[in-house]
Amino acid sequence: MLKENLIGSVLMCHAPIVIPSVAKTRAKMIEHSTQAMRNAAKFLVEKNPDVLVVLSPHTPRLSDKFGIIENNPISGSLIDFGVPEIEITLPSELEEKNLLLKETDKNIIAMTKIDNLDHGAIVPLYFLKEAGFNNNTIILSFPYSPSFEECEAIGKTILKAS
């Protein structure tokens, strides 16, 4: 439930190569990025959030609104990157999404349904799961060309709902 204040935020890479089993022999070349992802995930998991909100740059988009993925649970894999064994499934309760929707202007956000998470969400979630995270997760997608005002509004909405 979005009942506590915002307790932390991080920016995380979404390139699948930061996952060692994707990078394979190139893992050494990006080990600092991989460690940074682990550090960011550890930071968030130690905060023990009730709900994690992910703004994914690649989640299927609506043309003119931010989207909230309505699926519960949310899930996906990196099969498109040759590693189908990397699968993510996390709870995504409707109650938390409704609390977020209640705080927002319906002109900037809408519910949308997708079949699978994409790598823009899966990569950071992989590191969070690795660090022990298994709480409710909300995935937001960006509109095609959000304005500064829309980005500011979604940030304020998340803050207000937290």
Image: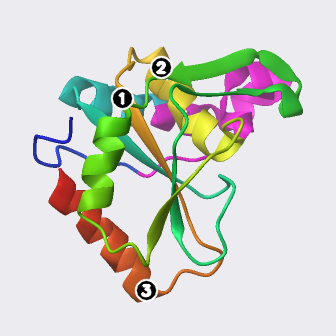
SS at circle 3: helix
Mark 3 = which residue? 148
Q: Which residue is mark 1?
A: 136
Residue at left offset 10%, top offset 41%: 4
Q: Can the viewer see residue 9 in this picture?
A: no
For disc 2, the marked residue is 129
Res 63 → quadrant: bottom right
Q: What amino acid type is highlighted by mark number 3?
A: Phe
Q: Residue furthest left?
A: 4
Q: Nearer the viewer, residue 33 or 107?
A: 107
Q: Is residue 36 magenta?
A: yes
Cα separation, mark 2 vs mark 3, equals 32 Å
Disc 2 packing (10 Å; few <14; some 14–19; many ≥20): some
Q: Earlier along the polypeptide chain: callout 1 or callout 3? A: 1
Q: Which amino acid type corresponds to the residue marked 2 in the rendered image?
A: Lys
Question: What is the secondary structure assignment of the residue under circle 2?
Answer: helix
Comes first in the chain, label 2 or label 3: 2
- Number of dots carrying numbers: 3
Q: Position of residue 11 (x, y in %)?
A: 44, 52
Residue 96 lies in the magenta-colored region: no
The alpha-carbon separation of the residues under discs 2 and 1 comes to 12 Å
Callouts 1 and 3 close, C-beta under 8 Å: no
- The secondary element bearing badge 1 is classed as strand
Magenta segment:
11-37
